[in-house]
Amino acid sequence: MKGRILIIDDEAEIRRNLTVGLTQEGYSAVACPDGISAIHELDASRTKGIAYDYLVTDIFMPDIDGLKILKVIKNQYPELPVLVITGYGDVSLEVEALSEYNTGYLDKPFEIPDLVKALGELTPGSTAKEAQVAEPEPAEKGLRESVSAYLTIRVTDPDKSMEIYTRLYQMEGVQLCEAVRGDFDIIILAQASSQQEIKTIFDKIAAMAGVEIASMSEVERPKLDRDVDEFIKIYADAVKRPAQTSPSQHPGTTSYIIVDIDKDVIQQIFTTVYFIDDVVFCDVIEDGTKLVGMITGHGAVGRTPRVIEKLSEIEGVLRVREAKVINIAE
């Protein structure tokens, strides 16, 4: 056998053709339809002591695009040869893919001999070596290491809007405070060492004149499979680093989103939303029935951001609400 290959492609016909063609060329091939199933396969194979000698991955897939999978797998298995394939690529995608060590790039359509030749040009390697797990960086002061909760607020006395916003912004325990346009006027992320301290912050805000609490929801840990959870942690540490940030640090327009979801498919929805480039961060609230997060956009004023349209198309997403951030400095 020439080697064991893991294929990731969302098109069934391509998976079948690659599997049959590579088998005829003397390889052993396993094909997965998306990023999540590939993560499961790599983890299961590692547990069984079965190594892969190559990864062949498409770029555009329904859950996690191939370049993101590439970065995480290269973080774990830097020697593994990877061939990126796509029918919708461009120069920038090719350059990004080839920037990773021992990675090749092949445009669709291609013949099996082309694929075999491209694999042969890569340096031999495998997942046989123990996966490298990056040491977690020390948590910075103020980042979400304890109890967190989102509060949405309506201002009932518009004349005091700026005064109320300033008091909330400066309040101890308030990690993020943004004025928004939507079903509410202000959204806050509060942090504390206990649920009781969160309640104290909530009570202090509720007692303010000119303020009405619309909702309070504690941030929950998403219910993910162990290997998927590990994948996300590695991606966060190695690539995304989605610490809570101010909208002023992101170009274009910025909005908060509240996404009502079918909790029975939370893993698929959460991972899909998390890996969308325009999603800055994403949290689970209300017993897994909602996601709240920040998105960026660059579309024309008054148009629905493309990312919201994309979210609405995800199976299991029931409703998406947007609250656009207001730049108080303007």
Image: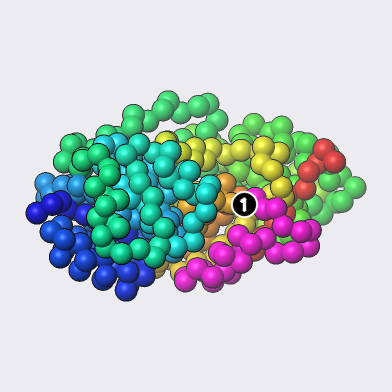
SS class of the residue under badge 1?
strand
- Percent of width and height locating residue 154: 75, 54
**Magenta span has 114?**
no
Q: Quadrant of the N terminus?
A: bottom left
Above or below: residue 299 compared with residue 54? below
Q: Residue at 53% across / 47% down in the picture?
A: 92
Q: Residue at 85% across / 41% down in the picture?
A: 330
Instruction: Give the magenta range.
Output: 296-320
- Percent of width and height locating residue 112: 26, 63
Choose between 75 and 134: the one closer to the eye. 75
Q: Residues within 10 Å of mark 1 (few under 14, many from 20)?
A: many
Say which quarter of the image contains residue 37. bottom left
Task: Identify the amino acid type marked 1.
Answer: Ile
Choose between 16 and 252: the one closer to the eye. 16
Above or below: residue 216 compared with residue 163? below
In the image: residue 258, left or right of residue 39 = right
Q: Residue at 72% across / 57% down in the picture?
A: 299
Choose between 237 and 10: the one closer to the eye. 10
- The answer, for residue 230, to whether it is visible in the render is no
- Percent of width and height locating residue 329: 82, 38
**Magenta span has 318?**
yes
